[in-house]
Amino acid sequence: MLSRLLNLLYPSKCPSCKGLSDVFSHSPICSSCWSKITKYTGPSCKICAKPFISMYAEICSECLKKAPPFSKVINYGLYEGVLVDAINHLKFNGLKRLVKPLSRLLLNFDFQGMDGVVPVPLSKKRLIERGFNQSLLFAQTISKEKKLPLFMDILLKVKETAPQTCLSGKERLSNLKNAFIIKGNIRNLRLLLVDDVMTTGTTVSECSKQLINAGAKEVVVLTLARVRMV
Ligand SMILES: [Zn+2]
Ligand SMILES: [Zn+2]
């Protein structure tokens, strides 16, 4: 009720269908578009969750070639359509009210056996620019709802890096070299590493590597959207 009233006072256009948004809690995305955000259930790699590998393959060629430092990736949807609009409005327009409905998508997964939640960090400069770290906001909700400790200052990004999206595979790797450090004791812990979007996986791999090198027993990656790779 309040949500509808607020939306009446602050009307906005849905970026996905250009119609008027109707519910404030996930506006500007309208209810009809929001309901189109669905979990990806098609074929994907059992380790890194890369979508659209063959129906008959369990593991993608990259993971077969070299086992990643994380044990698996739990991913919600494909980085397409309304989910992209919602993530972009949160990240680039600062619409923090979208954290709640987006986090809710992640709460249906089972995180049993995990000892804590770690967000993929932003560098200091990026954090100041954006004003918040969306992965930390997701991690906070998961920590609260699933009653798991939040380790927010354990994994730090100490190097300013170029946006990964502009770089090739090899460049992505060298771009992130020495970018992350671990502060504190995570010995023998099973950690859930939270990121919003996963493209090639270089960032979560690099973070997982640091966590494992510092003594973590296992890293499971949790992401909201996986980019369709060709
Ligand atoms: Zn819409
Ligand atoms: Zn894989």
Image: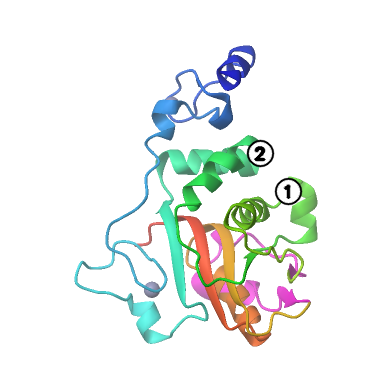
> The residue under label 2 is which amino acid type?
Lys
For the record, the magenta segment spans 156-183
- Relative height, residue 223 to residue 96 (above, below): below
> The residue under label 1 is which amino acid type?
Phe
Q: Earlier in the sequence, mark 1 or mark 2?
A: 2
Mark 1 nearby-residue class (10 Å; few <14, some 14–19, many ≥20): some
Residue 96: image tag? 2
Question: Would the CB of label 2 be found within 8 Å of ligand 1?
Answer: no
Report if residue 161 lies within the magenta region.
Answer: yes
SS category of the residue bearing label 1: loop
- Determine contact: label 1, label 2, CB under 8 Å: yes
Q: Quadrant of residue 9?
A: top right
Q: CA distance from mark 1 to mark 2?
A: 9 Å
Image quadrant holding the C terminus, namely bottom left
Residue 158, percent from left and from top:
77, 70
**Residue drawn at the location 68% of the way across and 38% of the way down:** 94
Mark 2 nearby-residue class (10 Å; few <14, some 14–19, many ≥20): some
Residue 132: image tag? 1
Is 118 placed left or right of 153 in the picture?
left
